[in-house]
Image (tube, rainbow, N blue to C red):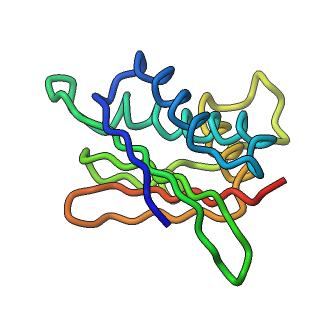
C-alpha cells in the first residue's frame, strides 16, 4: 500500500497541520479511533519537539501512514520519525505508578502509558540516524 508522508519543522505549532493530515488519511474503518490516533501521535511528537534536538537545531519530524496487513488483519500504521538524538520512548521512559496518590506521583510517563493502551502493537527502531516509532491501530 502507498505510504503518505508529511515532513514539518519539529515545533508544537505544527500539530494542527499534522492532525488535519491524520484526519484526511485515516481510512473509514478507523474513524472511530481518530481521537486516540491523534493523541498517541501528539504524545510522541511532543517528546520529539522538546527532547530530540538541541535548542539551536531546527529539527524535523515526519509522519507517515498507510494500511498494512499482519496475519490477515488490517491495521492503520502511523510512523513518527525524527533525526534527533537516539531515544526509545518505550524502553527509556519509566512507567507511571498508577497506584500512587496524585501527590506522590512523578510528573510524566502517563502519556506513553496511554499510547500503549491505544495501539494494538508498537515498534521502535533506530536506523541511519533516525528514530522511528511505528504505531499499529486496529479497526473499531
Determine whether, in the image, residue 127 is placed left or right of residue 99. left
Determine whether, in the image, residue 4 is placed left or right of residue 78. left
Residue reaching furthest top? 13
Q: Nearer the viewer, residue 49 or 137?
A: 137
What's the residue at 56%, 35% (across, down)?
43
What's the residue at 37%, 29% (across, down)?
49
What's the residue at 42%, 44% (across, down)?
63
Q: Quadrant of residue 108?
A: top right
Q: Quadrant of residue 31?
A: top right
Q: Which percent across, then down, holds residue 25?
A: 56, 43
Residue reaching furthest bottom? 71
Q: Nearer the viewer, residue 30 or 131?
A: 30
Q: Which percent across, then down, holds residue 138?
A: 75, 60
Determine whether, in the image, residue 117 is placed left or right of residue 17. right
Check the image and report above or below for 22 versus 77. above
What's the residue at 22%, 34% (across, down)?
59
Q: Nearer the viewer, residue 103 or 139?
A: 139
Q: Number of numbered discs present?
A: 0
Q: Which percent across, then down, holds residue 127?
A: 27, 66
Residue reaching furthest left? 56
Check the image and report above or below for 109 versus 105. below
Q: Which percent across, then down, holds residue 14?
A: 41, 21
Amino acid at each position: 500500500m502507498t505510504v503518505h508522508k508529511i515532513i514539518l519543522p519539529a515545533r508544537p505549532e505544527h500539530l494542527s497541520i499534522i492532525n488535519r493530515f491524520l484526519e484526511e488519511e485515516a481510512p473509514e474503518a478507523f474513524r472511530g479511533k481518530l481521537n486516540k490516533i491523534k493523541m498517541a501521535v501528539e504524545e510522541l511528537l511532543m517528546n520529539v519537539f522538546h527532547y530530540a534536538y538541541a535548542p539551536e537545531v531546527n529539527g524535523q519530524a515526519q509522519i507517515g501512514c498507510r494500511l498494512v496487513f499482519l496475519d490477515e488483519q488490517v491495521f492503520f500504521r502511523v510512523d513518527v520519525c525524527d533525526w534527533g538524538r537516539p531515544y526509545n520512548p518505550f524502553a527509556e521512559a519509566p512507567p507511571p505508578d498508577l497506584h500512587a496518590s496524585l501527590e506522590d506521583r512523578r510528573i510524566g510517563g502517563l502519556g506513553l502509558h496511554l499510547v500503549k493502551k491505544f495501539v494494538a502493537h508498537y515498534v521502535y527502531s533506530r536506523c541511519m540516524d533516525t528514530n522511528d516509532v511505528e504505531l499499529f491501530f486496529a479497526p473499531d
